[in-house]
């Protein structure tokens, strides 16, 4: 008997469509594992057992009646608890919304429903998406399945840990400054940050509206493309979605990288951890041996990214969080946690009379320079490859009392959000775990960055590399 | 009130005043005395880091308004079904006769 929880989406779709497994059986298996391991990992804020079983029953009915099925029919997945789900509690990881039950679905949730996916539950996160460790959740930190004393990354902490621990086959995520890519890299997973405007943000609780993108976390590159096939596209409910038609991202995914031009941005490697650098350069060599060409390139404004991001993002956070006053739903502003309060105060300051020009306006100018760096470099190369995180997963508690040091961990991810371009995190190996010295290593990811709307190309590059390495087969010992 | 030393382009130091009580009031955010003290220190660190941007001359740079380049996005002005009143009120704990019930604003104390 195969272990159903270790399947990829592609494999599970095949088993379901050939009637080798029933959606209800698959769903029960995941629900049982999720319930059991959640005590250890704290991935889920809500496990939506009744919803999942009803959805699975419906799918089995459609299969036995030979009805038309959605492309994710019977696939158990999890939703980050920022995604509004009609009838299922949606907390944003904050006590402010502890009892909030939305009356409508986010667009991405509706699309996944139409695709006949199964909703196992709502995943834990840094409250409101604020953080890179999962520790800012008001519902307790999530643990990294590869080392329970370390963080799984954030803010999509529960989504990454749940997929890594085989508690679901994929999970939705958001990426405002790295919140999809960084936890994916900390948990040996594939994480997509799409082009700004490629996926609808409607119904996803807003963090910083000019930076927010809607991603997802999967075990393999193919699975990631499969999900984007469903989530991408223009939405009349989100005016920032692009009218550019979506592509079929799984098609031609195995095209290879022959004569692809890869740029290595020097600023991203100058002070990088030597072991992480080694793994990324080995990955680049693998692509080179498949026919890609490699060039050194420069993104000169890289070092101003974090400062720019920590003006624009808190400014927009302070504005977006102003609506949570407890007047109509849920609780009042006294329930905000420390990080949300800190960002509201910082953002209120940078937008306040007398300081707007010096901070917000200045940051919007530097943002243009950062975007122009990318535009310029993509005239000469097709994609960029660089690290996602300056360090492997760090210890729980290590940075929580030092916000600036936590903010500086975002150094390699925020520029992508400021520029709006897409980026794909792909696992590229393991480094030794300094706490254990031996045994299970700690995952490392690299990001493949491309010009606006180049998601299809990113998948081709990631897929070419993954075929040779298959890091996703190295599962945590739980 | 705290002061942050910020290096300007000409490398002269100037001070930025952060009045945390005023900001908390603007943001309608209740803060404890301890939180005010902690945030003051942490925000000082963050703001002095952010002042790094003053190294860049941006006098000739246009601010980026938004990334997409889309303009005047509209939708058809047509009526469509929306949520019912009962549904909208289903998640609130304070309702009265089909309305949200809120604290009086104009009542005399």
Image (tube, coloured by chain):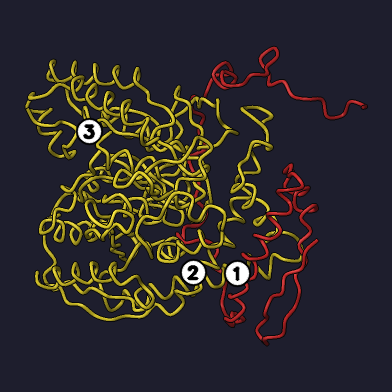
Chain colours: A yellow, B red
| Quadrant location of the N terminus of chain A in the rendered image | top left
Q: Position of residue A303 (x, y in %)?
A: 47, 74
Q: Position of residue A471 (x, y in %)?
A: 17, 53
Q: Quadrant of residue A177?
A: bottom left
**Residue under mark 3: which chain is it in?**
A
Q: Position of residue A138 (x, y in %)?
A: 54, 37
Q: Residues within 10 Å of mark 2 (few under 14, many from 20)?
A: many
**In the rendered view, would you say B58 is above or below A398?**
below
Q: Residue at x 18, y 48 (%)?
A: A474
Please tell me which residue lies in front, A171 or A142.
A142
**In the rendered view, would you say A419 is above or below A80?**
below
Position of residue A367 in the picture relative to residue A29 (left or right)? right
**Residue under mark 1: which chain is it in?**
B
Q: Which residue is mark 2?
A: A305
Q: CA distance from mark 1 to mark 2?
A: 10 Å
Q: Are the residues flagged by discs 3 and 2 in contact, CB closer than 8 Å?
A: no
Q: Residues within 10 Å of mark 1 (few under 14, many from 20)?
A: many
Position of residue A320 in the picture relative to residue A225 (left or right)? right
Q: Which residue is mark 1?
A: B50
Label 2: element kind? helix
Q: Residue at x 66, y 43 (%)?
A: A322
Label 1: element kind? helix
Q: Quadrant of residue A461?
A: bottom left
Q: Are the residues flagged by discs 1 and 2 in contact, CB closer than 8 Å?
A: no
Label 3: element kind? loop
| Quadrant location of the C terminus of chain A in the rendered image | top left
Have a look at marks 1 and 3 and say if they share a chain.
Answer: no
Please tell me which residue lies in front, A269 or A206.
A269
**Residue under mark 2: which chain is it in?**
A
Q: Which residue is mark 3?
A: A72
- Front position among marks 3 and 2: 2
Please tell me which residue lies in front, A235 or A106.
A106
């Amino acid at each position: 008997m195969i272990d159903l929880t270790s399947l990829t989406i592609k494999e599970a779709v095949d088993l379901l469509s050939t009637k080798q497994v029933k959606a209800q059986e698959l769903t029960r298996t995941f629900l049982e594992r999720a319930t059991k391991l959640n005590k250890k990992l704290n991935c889920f804020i809500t496990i939506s057992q009744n919803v999942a079983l009803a959805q699975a029953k419906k799918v089995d009915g459609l299969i036995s009646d030979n009805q038309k099925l959605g492309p994710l029919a019977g696939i158990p997945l999890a939703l980050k608890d920022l995604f509004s789900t009609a009838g299922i509690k949606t907390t944003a990881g904050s006590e402010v919304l502890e009892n909030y039950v939305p009356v409508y679905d986010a667009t991405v949730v509706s699309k996944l429903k139409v695709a006949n996916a199964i909703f196992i539950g709502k995943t834990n996160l840094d409250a409101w998406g604020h953080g890179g460790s999962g520790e800012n959740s008001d519902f307790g930190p999530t643990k990294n399945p590869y080392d329970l004393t370390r963080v799984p990354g954030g803010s999509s902490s529960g989504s990454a840990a749940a997929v890594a621990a085989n508690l679901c086959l994929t999970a939705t995520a958001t990426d405002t400054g790295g919140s999809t890519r960084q936890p994916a890299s900390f948990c040996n997973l594939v994480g997509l940050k799409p082009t700004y405007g490629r996926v609808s943000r409607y119904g996803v609780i807003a963090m910083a509206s000019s930076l927010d993108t809607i991603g997802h976390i999967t075990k393999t590159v193919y699975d990631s493309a499969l999900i984007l096939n469903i989530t991408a596209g223009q939405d009349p409910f989100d005016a920032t979605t692009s009218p550019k038609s979506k592509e079929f991202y799984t098609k031609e995914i195995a095209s290879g990288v022959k004569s692809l031009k890869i740029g290595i941005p020097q600023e991203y490697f100058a002070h990088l951890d030597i072991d992480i650098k080694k793994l990324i350069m080995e990955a680049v060599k693998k692509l080179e041996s498949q026919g890609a060409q490699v060039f050194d390139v420069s993104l000169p404004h890289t070092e101003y990214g974090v400062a720019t991001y920590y003006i624009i993002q808190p400014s927009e956070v302070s504005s977006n969080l102003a609506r949570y006053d407890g007047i109509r739903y849920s609780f009042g502003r006294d329930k905000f946690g420390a990080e949300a309060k800190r960002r509201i105060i910082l953002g209120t300051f940078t937008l306040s009379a007398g300081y707007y020009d010096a901070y917000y306006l200045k940051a919007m100018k530097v943002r243009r320079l950062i975007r122009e760096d990318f535009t310029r470099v993509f005239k000469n190369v097709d994609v960029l490859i660089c690290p996602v995180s300056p360090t492997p997963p760090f210890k729980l508690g290590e940075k929580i009392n030092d916000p600036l040091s936590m903010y500086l961990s975002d150094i390699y991810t925020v520029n992508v959000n400021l520029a709006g371009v897409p980026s794909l995190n792909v696992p590229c190996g393991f480094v030794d775990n300094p706490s254990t010295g031996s045994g299970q290593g700690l995952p490392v990811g690299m990001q493949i960055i491309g010009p606006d709307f180049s998601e299809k190309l990113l998948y081709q590059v990631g897929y070419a590399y993954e075929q040779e390495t298959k890091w996703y087969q190295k599962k945590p010992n739980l | 009130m705290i002061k942050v030393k910020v290096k300007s382009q000409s490398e002269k130091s100037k001070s930025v005043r952060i009045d945390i009580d005023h900001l908390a009031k603007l943001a309608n955010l209740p803060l404890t005395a301890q939180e005010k003290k902690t945030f003051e220190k942490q925000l000082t660190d963050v703001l002095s880091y952010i002042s790094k941007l003053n190294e860049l001359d941006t006098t000739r740079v246009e601010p980026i308004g938004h990334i997409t380049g889309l303009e005047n996005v509209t939708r058809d002005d047509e009526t469509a079904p929306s949520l019912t009143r009962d549904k909208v009120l289903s998640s609130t704990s304070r309702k009265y006769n089909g309305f949200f019930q809120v604290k009086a604003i104009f009542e005399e104390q």
